[in-house]
Image (tube, rainbow, N blue to C red):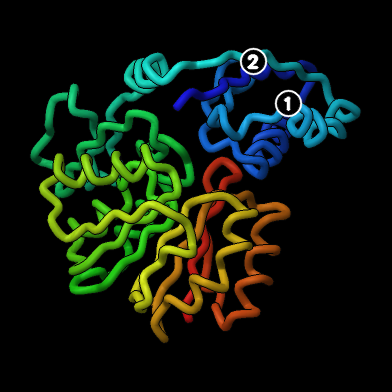
């Protein structure tokens, strides 16, 4: 699958202006972002690319500050090279070490996760992934059943298994992410991970102790009702992929409709991850 890369340059803009643009792009299908010295890069699958939709979504911001962007088509082979060139190992909370297959191991970390990202989202570099990993470290997962929605590379599902979950289902609608989750499970010797290709309609007809959903605001709003159905009473739901303002309040209000109680949230560079209990 090919991707489009949009390279944004922000001129006479405040720091939060970049977040406004990223939030709009995430809402129309962009799933990966990379900061640059002059702005940021945004990536979207070629099948989801619609320039008119992009220009319409960003139209109002041209009156607020000055920015422009250029469009590059990245073939599948080159996209893999982009990942490798930008993928540096991550150390989190002195407990987790995330590396690619081409990095040296560090066995003294309690949890080492090997990720071959290819074109799937979820290397641990994005703020939302970091926030979700932190939640997992704080959550009792021994002998729990876990559902990871929008699993990408499977990084969250893999950590859940390493933390003691007895059964982990990982779902993503993108076939490359589905394949990536399976391959990364093998790389990490994870044997209790079941990958499923699809969206909310393929969630198995059972209930879970913990549900993870690191996607984006619009998809979360569409799927929260299904999460509530799939979550056991007293179960924990962790969601990320949205901003503090105005997204958190919107997410909390929607979750309340399905008896999901907001507990607390984490924030990193304006990105938010929130915890709910049923």
Displayed quadrant of residue 120: top left
At mark 2, the secondary structure is: strand
In front: mark 2 or mark 1?
1
Look at the image and tell me in which quarter the N terminus lies.
top left
Q: Residue at x 71, y 35 (%)?
A: 16
Q: CA distance from mark 2 to mark 1?
A: 10 Å
Q: Residue at x 39, y 30 (%)?
A: 119
Which residue bears the numbered disc 1? 51
Q: Residues within 10 Å of mark 1 (few under 14, many from 20)?
A: few
Is 99 located above or below residue 92 in the figure?
A: above
Q: Nearer the viewer, residue 110 or 118?
A: 118
Q: Position of residue 74 (x, y in %)?
A: 49, 16
At mark 1, the secondary structure is: helix
Is 49 located above or below residue 69 in the figure?
A: below
Q: Residue at x 14, y 44 (%)?
A: 186
Query: Of callouts 2 and 1, which one flags the residue occurring earlier in the amino acid sequence?
Result: 1
Q: So how many labels did they put on this image?
A: 2
Q: Position of residue 220 (x, y in %)?
A: 57, 59
Q: Residue at x 34, y 24 (%)?
A: 87
Displayed quadrant of residue 193: bottom left
Which residue bears the numbered disc 2? 71
Is 55 located above or below residue 215 in the figure?
A: above
Q: Position of residue 125 (x, y in %)?
A: 40, 35
Q: Are marks 2 and 1 in contact (CB under 8 Å)?
A: yes
**Residue 183: image tag:** none
Q: Nearer the viewer, residue 78 or 20?
A: 78
Displayed quadrant of residue 64: top right
Q: Position of residue 159 (x, y in %)?
A: 25, 53
């Amino acid at each position: 699958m090919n991707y489009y890369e949009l390279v944004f340059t922000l001129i006479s803009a405040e720091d939060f202006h970049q977040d406004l643009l990223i939030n709009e792009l995430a809402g129309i299908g962009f799933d990966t972002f990379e900061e640059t010295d002059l702005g940021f890069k945004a990536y979207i699958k070629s099948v989801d690319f619609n320039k008119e939709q992009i220009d319409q979504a960003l139209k109002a911001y041209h009156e607020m500050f000055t920015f422009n962007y250029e469009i590059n088509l990245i073939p599948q082979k080159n996209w893999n090279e982009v990942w490798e060139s930008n993928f540096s190992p991550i150390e989190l909370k002195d407990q987790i070490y995330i590396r690619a297959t081409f990095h040296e191991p560090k066995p003294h970390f309690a949890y080492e996760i090997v990720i071959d990202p290819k074109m799937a989202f979820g290397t641990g570099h994005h703020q939302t992934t970091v926030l979700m990993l932190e939640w997992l470290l704080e959550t009792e997962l021994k002998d729990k059943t876990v559902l990871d929605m929008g699993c990408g590379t499977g990084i969250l599902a893999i950590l859940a298994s390493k933390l003691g979950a007895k059964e982990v289902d990982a779902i993503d609608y993108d076939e490359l992410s589905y394949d990536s989750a399976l391959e990364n499970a093998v790389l990490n010797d994870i044997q209790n991970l079941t990958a499923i290709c699809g969206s909310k309609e393929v969630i198995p007809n059972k209930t879970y102790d913990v549900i993870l959903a690191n996607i984006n605001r619009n998809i979360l709003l569409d799927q929260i009702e299904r999460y509530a159905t799939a979550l056991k009473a007293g179960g924990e739901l962790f969601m990320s992929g949205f901003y503090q303002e105005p997204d958190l309040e919107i997410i909390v209000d929607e979750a309340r409709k399905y008896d999901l109680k907001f507990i607390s949230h984490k924030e990193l560079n304006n990105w938010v991850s929130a915890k709910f209990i049923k």
